[in-house]
Image (tube, helix red, strand yellow):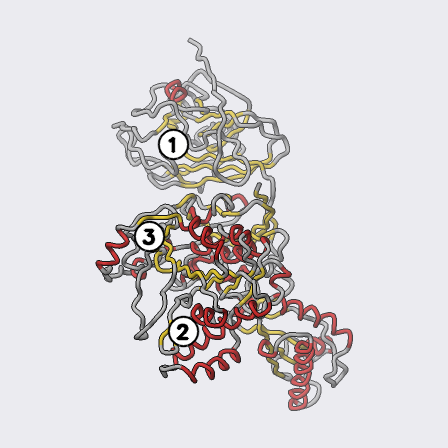
């Protein structure tokens, strides 16, 4: 009897790569039933699964969690719960999957394809072994076809495997390819096809198939050219500035040099923490001593020009090297001209590993195996948070019984709603944070609109360097705006604050301000410990820097974010924190909010009370109508004053596409899965997303992730907008235009 063949077309919501996967039910998750046994006919598969069908009389299988066949050992699917199983017995019997595409292929359009393949450990009394595939095993696109037997289909897949591709028991292998459609095909067929010129070229065995993906190329990758602003030689970075001219045997600058030096001023202004050594060099004409002095004077002339153009002296150094560092032969005029030069070598920041990291994001946001495991903040810069840290041990500290009972018996209140309600009557909000794990920053980001609506217009940040004077005009942070600002979450917090109308202000003091504070503190302090004196002097200077806003604008309302414990409102024998000094200077009692104590860390670093309560959202607990605040033991005796006003209890991270859900920020950021294979990149691969209207040579990326070779889905999280993605696998780098809608 003729088989009636139909495929049911339904609406499918695809959560996957940016762009449209035109394969419905790509992971075989949408089914009418979940079979327990292998199919005995193609109609069994058709009746179990939505969208997919069998193009011949063979009995393709839907492998489900209920599967319990003695003839086959199933394995965990690549993703989800279901997968497809096909048998290839030879040219007389082969099974396939067939599906009608959500839209026909467009002739002349290039498509990217991928699927995952594996094998069982036992099938039909045999133990399968790794099996080499071939160029007729893969995906074939055509019109709707059906054969009324079990024989192998004769066709040449547009995307076939190679003889080096191997399907292995248990292990999932990703298969990828790309092709240009030569017809408006409506259906996809997956399996082993017959090569009439070589009939014996058949991969026999039982194969599991999962996660089939087909997407039209909407954007293509182009090779990434590092910035023309710098040159990297080994671990040393130099700024590219040419055409610095002097009169022969003199050190006065020619006016033709001014344009180039003005470009250098712009680069140094955009990179506020960049420090350089100006190196003068000469050819070998004249004595070594004369050339040494000449090169020194030429470097000094450039130093003076930059300093007179507004670049601080502490960011500049100069040296003359004479003839000792020639870059060309002095046997010709051309070579001697190359040797008469001025170089601008970047000095490394102590926080960073080498000077390259001062110049470009691709050196900051690098593969995790290039980052020291103990540098947790650096790991978080590339989206590797607590779940991916190397955490050893567990704290043996026990919670105090009284605090344990208070927390257990406290009433939970939504932290965001409570803080927003309090801001109506506050003039100063002081938050601290745990800098290695940016969940606290993400939480503060979600309240910016409410803070601004309540009249707060100044945002004081600890880590933003005061030398970044162009930050508020530029409207985005650069990698030299501050160490922790390199964290994409921190960088976007700054962007959002400026977009909403906040003025970003650094409160960090200069060395001179700290020394002045030291001389003042020593007059009244009743302790002599040098470390405590310097700490309270720093906090005095920080508070004084904040106080300057109130001298300029007495009605100002401010938000302060710090990573330290200097929001504690304590006062003991002359020792005060920043918050306490702030209150002394301004007569304003700030609302102090601790985010550090009850937040996710390595187990050995977590507070013993963290984990006592389970929360789904940031929470404040109330005990007998007063906010629960853990009482810390002070190192200074006879301390008076409050610890803090509020403590937020953060939930442990939950994950979607290997990213913490708190990073979604209530829908502000959307998942964007980027596949390095699609662009010819190997894995692991670092992917950074830069806003289209920002200079990606210097800007802090909106997000950065490492895509590994495990097959685990991981996505960028980006707000709606236009971006440039930078992909770097350590061997090559490419950039891709990307739109989030």
Asked if residue 684 can be seen in this view, the reply is: no
Q: CA distance from mark 3 to mark 2?
A: 29 Å
| Residue carrying label 3 | 625
Q: Position of residue 198 (x, y in %)?
A: 48, 30
Q: Position of residue 577 (x, y in %)?
A: 41, 71
> Which mark is first along the chain, 2 or 1?
1
Residue count near mark 2 (Cα–Cα under 10 Å), binned few <14, some 14–19, many ≥20:
many
| Residue carrying label 2 | 576
Quadrant holding the N terminus: top left
Residue at left offset 47%, top offset 47%: 665
Q: CA distance from mark 1 to mark 2?
A: 63 Å
Could you say which quadrant of the image residue 502 lies in? bottom right
Q: Secondary structure beneath disc 2?
A: strand
Q: Position of residue 726 (x, y in %)?
A: 56, 53
| Residue carrying label 1 | 83
> Which mark is first along the chain, 1 or 3?
1
Residue count near mark 3 (Cα–Cα under 10 Å), binned few <14, some 14–19, many ≥20:
few
Residue at left offset 46%, top offset 39%: 175
Q: Position of residue 606 (x, y in %)?
A: 31, 59
Q: Which is closer to the viewer, label 3 or label 1?
A: 3
Q: Please name whichever residue, 406 or 28, is drawn nearer the observer in this view of the structure.
A: 406
């Amino acid at each position: 009897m003729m088989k009636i063949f139909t495929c049911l077309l339904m609406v499918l919501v695809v959560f996957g790569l940016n762009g449209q996967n035109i394969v419905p039910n790509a992971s075989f998750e949408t089914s009418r039933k979940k079979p327990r046994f292998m199919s005995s006919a193609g109609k069994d598969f058709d009746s179990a699964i939505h969208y997919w069908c069998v193009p011949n009389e063979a009995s393709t299988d839907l492998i489900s969690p209920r599967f319990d066949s003695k003839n086959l050992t199933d394995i965990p699917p690549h993703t989800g719960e279901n997968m497809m199983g096909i048998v290839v017995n030879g040219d007389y019997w082969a099974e396939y999957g067939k599906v009608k595409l959500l839209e026909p292929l467009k002739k002349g359009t290039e498509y990217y394809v991928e699927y995952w393949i594996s094998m069982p450990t036992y099938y039909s009394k045999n133990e399968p072994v790794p099996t080499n595939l071939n160029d007729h095993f893969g995906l074939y696109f055509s019109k709707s076809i059906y054969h009324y037997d079990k024989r192998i289909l004769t066709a040449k897949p547009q995307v076939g495997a190679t003889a080096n591709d191997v399907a292995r028991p248990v292990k999932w292998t990703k298969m990828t390819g790309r092709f240009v459609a030569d017809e408006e095909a409506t259906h996809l067929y997956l399996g082993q096809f017959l090569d009439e010129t070589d009939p014996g070229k058949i991969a026999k065995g039982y194969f599991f198939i999962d996660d089939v993906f087909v997407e039209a190329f909407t954007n293509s990758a182009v090779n990434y050219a590092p910035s023309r602003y710098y040159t990297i030689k080994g671990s040393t970075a130099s700024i590219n500035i040419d055409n610095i001219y002097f009169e022969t045997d003199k050190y006065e600058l020619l006016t033709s040099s001014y344009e180039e030096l003005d470009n250098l001023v712009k680069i140094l202004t955009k990179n506020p923490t960049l420090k350089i050594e100006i190196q003068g060099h000469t050819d070998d004409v004249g004595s070594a001593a004369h050339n040494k002095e000449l090169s020194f004077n030429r470097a000094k002339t450039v130093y003076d020009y930059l300093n007179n153009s507004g670049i601080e002296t502490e960011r500049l150094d100069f040296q003359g090297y004479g003839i000792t560092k020639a870059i060309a032969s002095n046997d010709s005029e051309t070579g001697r001209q190359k040797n008469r030069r001025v170089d601008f070598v970047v000095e490394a920041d102590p926080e960073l590993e080498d000077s390259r990291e001062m110049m470009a994001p691709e050196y900051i946001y690098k593969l995790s195996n290039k980052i020291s495991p103990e540098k947790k903040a650096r790991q978080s810069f590339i989206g590797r948070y607590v779940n991916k840290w190397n955490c050893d041990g567990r704290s043996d500290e026990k919670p105090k019984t009284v605090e344990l009972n208070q927390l257990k018996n406290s009433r939970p209140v939504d932290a965001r709603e409570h803080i927003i309600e309090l801001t109506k009557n506050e003039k100063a909000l002081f938050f601290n944070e745990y800098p290695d794990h940016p969940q606290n920053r993400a939480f503060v980001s979600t309240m910016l609109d409410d803070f601004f609506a309540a009249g707060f217009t100044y945002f004081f940040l600890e880590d933003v360097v005061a030398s970044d004077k162009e930050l508020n005009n530029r409207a985005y942070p650069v990698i030299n705006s501050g160490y922790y600002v390199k964290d994409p979450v921190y960088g976007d917090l700054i962007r959002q604050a400026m977009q909403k109308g906040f003025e970003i202000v650094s409160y960090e003091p200069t060395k001179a301000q700290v020394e002045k504070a030291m001389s003042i503190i020593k007059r009244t302090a009743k302790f002599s410990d040098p470390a405590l004196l310097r700490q309270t002097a720093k906090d005095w200077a920080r508070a004084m820097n904040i106080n300057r806003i109130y001298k300029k604008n007495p009605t100002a309302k401010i938000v302060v974010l710090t990573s330290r414990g200097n929001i504690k409102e304590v006062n003991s024998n002359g020792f005060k924190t920043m918050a306490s000094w702030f209150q002394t200077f301004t007569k304003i009692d700030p609302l102090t909010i601790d985010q550090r104590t009850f937040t996710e860390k390595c187990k050995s670093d977590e507070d013993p009370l963290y984990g006592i309560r389970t929360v789904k959202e940031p929470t404040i607990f109330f005990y007998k109508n007063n906010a629960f605040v853990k009482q810390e033991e002070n190192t200074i005796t006879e301390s008076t004053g409050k610890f803090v006003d509020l403590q937020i209890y953060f939930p442990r991270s939950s994950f979607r596409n290997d990213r913490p859900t708190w990073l979604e920020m209530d829908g502000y950021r959307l998942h964007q899965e980027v596949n390095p294979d699609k662009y010819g990149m190997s894995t692991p691969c670092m992917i950074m997303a830069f806003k289209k209207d920002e200079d990606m040579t210097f800007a802090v990326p909106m997000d950065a992730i490492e895509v590994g070779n495990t097959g685990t889905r991981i996505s960028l999280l980006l707000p709606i907008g236009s971006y440039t993605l930078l992909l770097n696998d350590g061997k090559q780098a490419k950039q891709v235009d990307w739109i989030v809608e």
